[in-house]
Amino acid sequence: MRADDQSTWRYTADDGVVIGENLPLQILRVVLGWRIRNPVTGVMKLATGSGVPARRISLPSFQIAANLADELVNRAAGGNEPRYHGAGVISEGDDQKTVLDMMCAGCCARFRDTAGKLALVVSHNDLASAAIDDGLNDDDVVGAFNWDPDPSLEATPNIVRGKYVDPTTASLYQLIDYPEVSLPSPDGQDRYLSLDLGVVESPSHAQRVAKQVLQRRQYSRQFSAAFDIRAWKYNVGDVLPFTFAPLGFTRTLFRVKEQELGQGGTCNMVLTFETPDFYQWDASDALPVQAAEPIIYDSRNNPLILAIDDAAKTATEYVAPEAVLGGYRDPVTGVVTGGQTVGMALATLDKIEPITLDVSDIKRASIDQNALIRQADRDRAQLAAAQIAGLLDQQVTRITLRDAGLITDPESGRVYIYAVEQNAQKVSKVEIGLDAVTNEIALRATYDDVATMITQAQLSPGDAAELGELVRRVNVAEISISGMTAAIALKADAITVTKLGGIVQSVSQTLDALAGEVTTKVSYSDFNPVRDRVGTVEQLLQSYGDVSTYQLTLRQAELRGTAAAAAGIASLVSNADTAQRLIVRSAEIQQQLTVRMDEGDAAEATSRLALAAKVGANEAGLVEERQTRADAVSAQAKRTDLLTATVVDQGATFDARFISQAKAISDGDKAQADRTDILTATVTKLGQDITATFAQQAKVISDGDSASATALTQLTARIGDFGLVSVQQAFSVLADRTGKLEGQYTLSIDTNGRLQGFKLAGSATGPATFSFIDTDLNMGLGRVIYNTGVVMQVQGIGFGRDGDLLEWFGPSMPVNACTRANARSYKTTDGNEYMGGSLSAGTRTNAVRSTMFAATAEVTTGEFESAGRARIVTVSLLFSTARQNPGSCPASPVTPTVTVELFRGTSASGVVLATRTLTGSFFCDLGRPNEPGSLIEQISGAVTFTDNSGGTASGYYVRLANRNTNTFPDQQILSLVSVEE
């Protein structure tokens, strides 16, 4: 098929492939138009379409677009379909631009002027070419720039809905709704975009187009500037990577939207933002639309910061964190004011490192259960021995006896003195032993009281267990004195035996002068068929050499066993084995105090208190350790606390802990104190730990030249390996003799490795720096107020006297008095915006335009600030009327003219700068049979004036006069631009 021979055009190609539904080919058909031959003259006349000659069309671009449209894409509902095929009903009377816009919308296409030819480009992912392109950078931008980031929330739709062509018999090519495409609105208020697709026949095709349109509307970002000659290597539609430090761009992808020759040979370009997100639906309609990624300025990409980093890699020069970036340097004094330090410019959040505390050297609170079991076994044996001894002595106890005596042995140097009283119920005996060889004195008093039943019983192995109320008491008191060892030992035992069990009580004390030690012990054991209870108190006092110690131990336990242990004392009498009893609950307190003089010149005092309680597998412990130490050059104190509570229930372990440690250290170089507290709660189920932690740490240091303090607070929650979230609050201050004064406050949140939060850094030379990292600032109904006392700026939601302001700038006043009338500039909740004064960035440009149809249309820049340099003022006018089939033409048409008058000032009372009459053209043709007529009237032109009047303020006014035309315009645009380099 040939573009210049319409006889070769086909709906179905020679190979049977249907190409008539290919939308780019349909667009080419409309652009070329369809001509019919006059049967009389043989001349070909345009019947439908635009009639653009084939030589003016870039046919290769249409071939590429047609191939893209034929490619198969997947449907979320299953199967596939050509990317952009369609059909629709078009009338000869339809406006050509409207028809072409509708067809381009159906295939995400746009027209471009390529080397003077009309080209068609279908949107597709061609971003890979930018990977090997060096792109443009800061050096290529030679003039002022303009950056339009994302539009306001009100101008950003989040829902696209519309209609597509239903070719089924149910609708007969009528338009019906396709499923709407949406994404959540940031403020919960939906904003709709209507998109009718009059040549799309498939709902999945409509979804792909609607999703691309909605995704692009989330990124309406545009950059415009004058570029150097290198920019001419790109054409309109090309993708380029752009690095631009003032906006934090690092090879950010843009596409050339507009390009024109500027003054001095510059390449003036408008670039639109590009992202692969636009092309997610090249192959499928399944993926959802995503909200736009926020624009984030990464100060680390600033060329100055990068240069510092490069210098650090290649040179030995050190750039201190307090080095100042920016600010103003006085050319005379060299003093820098304002700006920020390198450390402030590199505001980031450090990874949250959990606060830990090493207490591995702290002995945990525990219960010496072996000591309790040994005491129970020993006292039970004493109880049994006392009863058996009473049974064996029953014949003796029936004899009444009183006796006393003194026995001496000169050869051995020993003396024994005794006195005894014995009857059927008791034995009372006192003894004294003297031994000159061992230099010992021993005193002993024994009292054995047996119930009458014992003396009357006729015991045999068969009836030993049948005893009635059996009671025996054995009391013993002893004193041992040794002059050779300089020791005294005191002991008193009381044993009470009953049928159900018995009680063993014992107290003892040892005084050892050579060891410098006093030991005291009290124990109590109670045995019965239900349970055994044992308790003990032990005390040690020692002072020997360089160490003095005090120790105190208290223990209590309850033991229980099986039914075999319930036979009580009868089983002892019958010599039966008892079942082993286990400790079911216990408690212990240990206290130790020590003072020490180390070798050299150090002195130390320590204390330890440990409490423990245990019932079954559940236990609780508390440890307190205190330590103080001093020597000739330093002093330190340390305190450590450890609390634990553990419960095991149905296979789950519940564990709560508190650890605290504080230290104070001073030496000849510095003084330092720090404290760490950690609270942890953990539940372990099915091998998985679920943990919550609170930790805080504080540290202060002074070395005489500087002082610093830091404080950290952390909250952490973790569920096994599934997730972790931590919140950290950090404070730090620093002051030194060099004049450095720093303060910093940081709040960080770590959610599975993603760091978010803010950092506030103070400065003595300028305002503090408040940095948000990966964090949105949602003010709600709050306001941001900048107030110098003379002027102020306010930002908020619905503030001011009428509650209708979003932004307001003007003289200082109460916020509730702000209105549109007293503002120099404002932005309102209904989308209106006003800016007084001028807008300038580099080149000072003030531009206004009017679209009024009136013959006396006028426009003014208003008064604006000027630097006093030459201002180039340009006035342009476009007047146009275009109609098809006008019905009639003027009998005597006039040549359209209009006069443009330019004034310096803001009204016609100003100084006249230029007056020019612009002349246009008029064409009217009523047409012929089968050929539509047309009427076209147009005036266009411009007036340029160079104003060298100078001054610090200026303004311009332009108006139309003496307009003489044949028609009322369809369009009239009057523009006024002032440019001051």
Image (cartoon, helix red, strand yellow):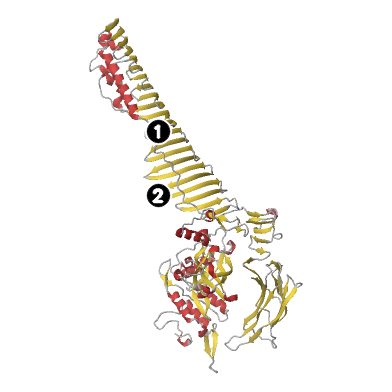
Element type where label 1 sits in the image: loop
Look at the picture and state if 55 lies above or below 512. below
Task: Decide which of 476, 19 is in the foreground and name it.
Answer: 476
Task: Decide which of 111, 838 is in the foreground and name it.
Answer: 838
Element type where label 2 sits in the image: loop
Kind of residue at badge 2: Asp
In the image as oriented, which residue stretches furthest toward the bottom?
A: 40
Query: Mark 1 = which residue?
Result: 365
Look at the picture and state if 786 lies above or below 14. above
- Residue 4 appears in the rendering: yes
Q: Quadrant of the N terminus?
A: bottom left
Residue 254, percent from left and from top: 51, 69
Residue 153, percent from left and from top: 58, 61
In the image as oriented, which residue stretches furthest toward the left?
A: 461
Q: Is residue 422 left or right of residue 298?
A: left
Q: Is residue 892 left or right of residue 445?
A: right
Q: Quadrant of residue 974?
A: bottom right
Kind of residue at badge 1: Ala
Residue at 55 percent of width and 46 percent of height: 736
Q: How many marks do you count on the picture?
A: 2
Residue 645, percent from left and from top: 42, 36
Look at the picture and state if 727 lies above or below 381. below
Local packing at callout 2 (Cα closer than 10 Å; few below 14, some 14-19, many 20+) is few
Q: Is residue 639 left or right of residue 945?
A: left
Q: Earlier in the sequence, mark 2 or mark 1?
A: 1
Q: Quadrant of the C terminus?
A: bottom right
Query: Mark 2 = which residue?
Result: 721
